[in-house]
Amino acid sequence: MRIIKKSKEINSLFNSFKKTGFVPTMGSLHKGHEYLIKKSVKENNVTFVSIFVNPKQFNNKMDLKKYPKNLKEDVKICRKCKVNYLFLPSFKEVYSWKVQSKKKTPKIKNIMEHKYRKGHFKGVIKVIEKLSNIIPASKMYLGEKDFQQIKVITDYFNINKVKTKIVKCKTVRDKNGLALSSRNKLLKKENLKKAVNIVNFIKKIKLKNIHSNLKINIIRNYLKKNDVKFDYVQNINLKQFNISKNRTINTRIFFAFYLGTVRLIDNL
């Protein structure tokens, strides 16, 4: 595996390869990231991984400051997963990169993350604009835990005719059903157990043959009863990507809640 820190150096490699995969990450890698990387390695001739904590997508400075980092372990994981190139840029290296043509910004519905994390997706679009231009891979691999983010990036690629194909990958969970997340590492033991209970409760309610609005109310009341602060619990139509009152195969329950100062998101 080759580690590269310069944008021009990694960008110049694309004249040499066909069938390239790219997994953009913010580090603190876990089994979910490993799944994305292994899928890319299997489907492509060459796999690129980036580790870059993008300050522009954090609307909370304390969240940025506390974001878990373990570069030494991340490098080990990338080697183990047979990554070909690991991109470790500085802030200046990413944001000084000149994108040749002006890009359009997709319209984002004011629901879920866009409603509760002001400026978040603006930061996501900006870093994806840079990284997808520095690393113009055939495919980009993203996990469905961040489903709305995938939607935003896909819309950005479509309106700007970016040739990279988005590969949506299933959410990887631990043995107790909790979605793997770098932020899980910040949870105290009792809150980790509480997170598992919340997710499994929502999963149980989702399977009940009752009206969607009733399901949402039951989940919200459960969180309130257990003194769990939450931003949203919503039934979302995946095709139209809006709040839906109906229960179909094209809907999922999306939620964001806090345990202490740690904010977790998921969808079931």
Image (cartoon, rainbow, N blue to C red):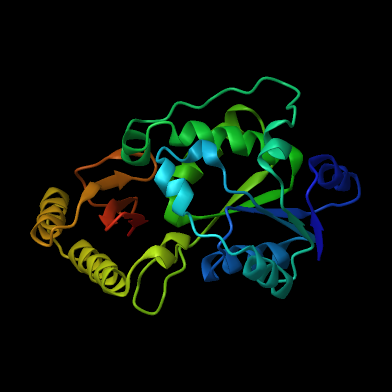
Is 68 left, or right, of 157 in this rendering? left
Position of 38 relative to 124 (above/below): below
Query: What x and y, as percent, mark residue 138?
Result: 73, 48
At 72% from the left and 21% from the top, the residue drawn is 101
Front in this rendered view, residue 27 or 35 = 27
Dividing the image into 4 quarters, which one contains the N terminus?
bottom right
Question: x%, y% of residue 77?
Answer: 66, 71
Q: Is residue 42 left or right of residue 231?
A: right
Taking 11 as reference, is 158 left or right? left
The residue at the point 71 percent across, 47 percent down is 89
Residue 82 seen in the current view: yes
Question: Can residue 163 be seen here?
Answer: no
The image quarter in which residue 161 lies: top right
Residue 176, image x, y percentages: 34, 77
Q: What x and y, as percent, mark residue 156? A: 56, 32
* Residue appearing at x 54%, y 68% in the figure: 30
Which residue is at the far top?
A: 102
Q: Residue furthest bottom?
A: 175
Tell me the quadrant of the picture where the C terminus can be found. bottom left
Residue occupying the point 31% across, 37% down = 116
